[in-house]
Image (cartoon, rainbow, N blue to C red):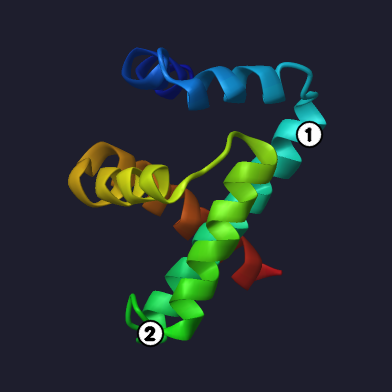
């Protein structure tokens, strides 16, 4: 996680969104971080299930998840504008390392839920 934090600071540290993130999260406890990050992972798992069910990116189901994702980021991290959301999508598609990290966490979460 430290590598991700360093990379995020290097990439976006001079942006308003990054400064808002620092301000919004500065008093988060370990429990709050776990809650917020678990919420994000749950949304990623919903995206994976949507994909596995054959939903297209422009389907109502997928677009509702995009809105849910954007709202979660805005509520817990920083204001996620449509422009920022588009960049996040491009990072996921173009940055193989980010994709592997997210996909790996989602698969772990899905496997955990399947065992319960």
Q: Is residue 36 left or right of residue 56?
A: right
Residue 86 x/y as whole percent:
33, 50
Q: Are marks 2 and 1 in contact (CB under 8 Å)?
A: no
Q: Is residue 40 left or right of residue 35?
A: left
Crowd band around label 1 with a 10 angstrom C-alpha radius: few (<14), some (14–19), many (20+): few
Residue 51 x/y as whole percent:
38, 76
Residue located at (60% from left, 23% from top): 20
Crowd band around label 2 with a 10 angstrom C-alpha radius: few (<14), some (14–19), many (20+): some
Helix, strand or loop for disc 1: helix
Q: Which residue is mark 2?
A: 55
Q: Nearer the viewer, residue 61 or 31?
A: 61
Residue located at (38% from left, 53% from top): 103
- What is the spatial separation of the Cα atoms under label 2 and label 1, in whole angstroms? 32 Å
In this orientation, does residue 65 appear? yes
Residue located at (61% from left, 59% from top): 42
Question: If the image is split into quadrants, where does the C terminus sit?
Answer: bottom right
Q: Nearer the viewer, residue 46 or 24?
A: 24
Q: Which residue is mark 1?
A: 32
Q: Nearer the viewer, residue 100 or 65?
A: 65
Residue 60 x/y as whole percent:
47, 84
The quarter of the picture where residue 37 lies is top right
Q: Earlier in the sequence, mark 2 or mark 1?
A: 1
In this orientation, does residue 109 appear? no
Q: Is residue 80 left or right of residue 90?
A: right
Helix, strand or loop for disc 2: loop
Residue 16 x/y as whole percent:
49, 22
Residue 8: which disc?
A: none
């Amino acid at each position: 996680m430290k590598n991700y934090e360093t990379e995020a600071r290097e990439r976006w540290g001079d942006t308003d969104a990054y400064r808002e993130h620092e301000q919004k999260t500065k008093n988060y406890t370990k429990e709050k971080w776990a809650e917020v990050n678990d919420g994000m992972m749950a949304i990623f798992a919903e995206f994976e299930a949507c994909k596995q069910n054959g939903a297209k990116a422009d389907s109502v189901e997928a677009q509702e998840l995009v809105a849910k994702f954007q709202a979660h980021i805005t509520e817990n991290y920083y204001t996620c504008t449509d422009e920022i959301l588009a960049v996040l999508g491009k990072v996921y598609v173009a940055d193989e390392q980010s994709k592997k990290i997210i996909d790996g966490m989602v698969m772990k979460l899905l496997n955990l839920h399947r065992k319960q």
